[in-house]
Image (cartoon, coloured by chain):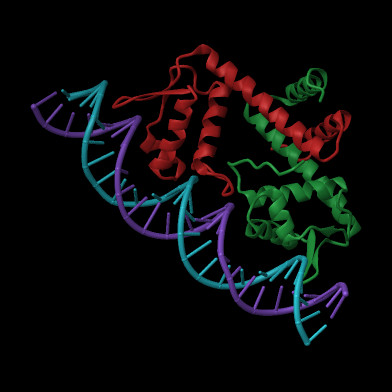
Chain colours: A red, B green, C purple, D cyan
Amino acid sequence: MNKWIFDPDKPIFRQICEKFRDEIARGNFPPGAKVPSVRDLAVFAGVNPNTVQRALSDLEDEGILVSRRGDGRYVADDATVRDKLLAARIRSACDDFIGAMRVLGLDDREIERSLGEALREKSDGKEG
Amino acid sequence: MNKWIFDPDKPIFRQICEKFRDEIARGNFPPGAKVPSVRDLAVFAGVNPNTVQRALSDLEDEGILVSRRGDGRYVADDATVRDKLLAARIRSACDDFIGAMRVLGLDDREIERSLGEALREKSDGKEG
DNA sequence: ATTATTGTATTAACACAATAATACAAAGCG
DNA sequence: CGCTTTGTATTATTGTGTTAATACAATAAT
């Protein structure tokens, strides 16, 4: 995984936020873990340091990260952060999905059926 | 439903596109149906006419709408448009959802379980 | 103390989304 | 025809996302 790929339709700094929320939710960044420097991340992501700074600064406002000037940036040393993040992201993903499907006029049974079909398609043909 | 509500994090013209795709997919705008004028929609949505124009113009490029100068704008007179639109939107919603959940480390069974829980919560407590 | 590393702040420049105010083109209508 | 309605185009302005180039502040390492 060389460089990150961004959706040109959404602000990059938000996508960086998402990436870190996902990584932390998965447990790839345990509480207290050090995050790469703004400059290193910028090089790795192929974006401007200011863009990374903006993203990490937002995550700090959310209480997910903590920064120490001259030292570095760390995942908040709170063992519950990961669980809360994971639960919140699962919930919002489900809610978004359900909302999108209901707007299309599907009822609960149809929603579950459509998901099942999509899951089977993704498992059958394109196993990669 | 007085005025539309927009997510300030996404371009308004894209959200207007989404709204129309949803409405057409639901069948609320059958093939050949006339769409309100750019100016009326702008007033109704509480946005600038140019923003609406941009959105509807994009839908035209997709073949969903057709415009006649001095007359008005209409849903493409193609009976298959709705089905294609509906199928495409269901599929992309499922794919987005599955992708978001897999990033979080959930397998197929957990994805279906989480959705089931969310559906039950939405049906039980907050019936509105 | 000096140096390197890190987070932070500032300023400028550019692109795009959105608003605003017009003007023009084409169709419908009385 | 004359008027209205509609889609379309143009120009200017504002706000924001992004890049860019610096500078400053604080910590660690030497």
Depicted D16 relative to depicted B101: above or below:
below
Front-most of B69 and C13?
B69
Query: Residue at the spot x=57%, y=23% of the render?
Result: A25
Residue lying at the far right in this picture: please name it.
B79
Q: Which of the image's four quarters has the C terminus of chain A?
A: top right
User: Measured from the top left, where is residue A32 in percent x and y?
Assistant: 43, 17
User: Measured from the top left, where is residue D10 in percent x and y?
Assistant: 55, 72
Q: Is residue A74 left or right of residue A110?
A: left
Query: Residue at the spot x=71%, y=59% of the render?
Result: B39
Front-most of A117 and A89?
A89
- Looking at the image, how many numbered discs can be counted on the residues? 0
Please say whether residue A121 is visible from this viewpoint.
Answer: no
Query: Residue at the spot x=54%, y=38% of the render?
Result: A15
Q: Is residue B70 left or right of residue A20?
A: right
Depicted A108 relative to depicted D5: above or below:
above
Residue lying at the far top in this picture: please name it.
A79
Depicted A67 relative to depicted B77: above or below:
above
Front-most of D29 and A49?
A49
Say which quarter of the image contains residue A5. top right
User: Measured from the top left, where is residue B92 in percent x and y?
Assistant: 74, 42
Q: Is residue A43 left or right of residue B111?
A: left
Please say whether residue A91 is visible from this viewpoint.
Answer: yes
Depicted B47 relative to depicted B120: above or below:
below
Front-most of C28 and A78?
C28
User: Measured from the top left, where is residue B40 in percent x and y?
Assistant: 74, 57
Q: Is residue B23 left or right of residue A19?
A: right
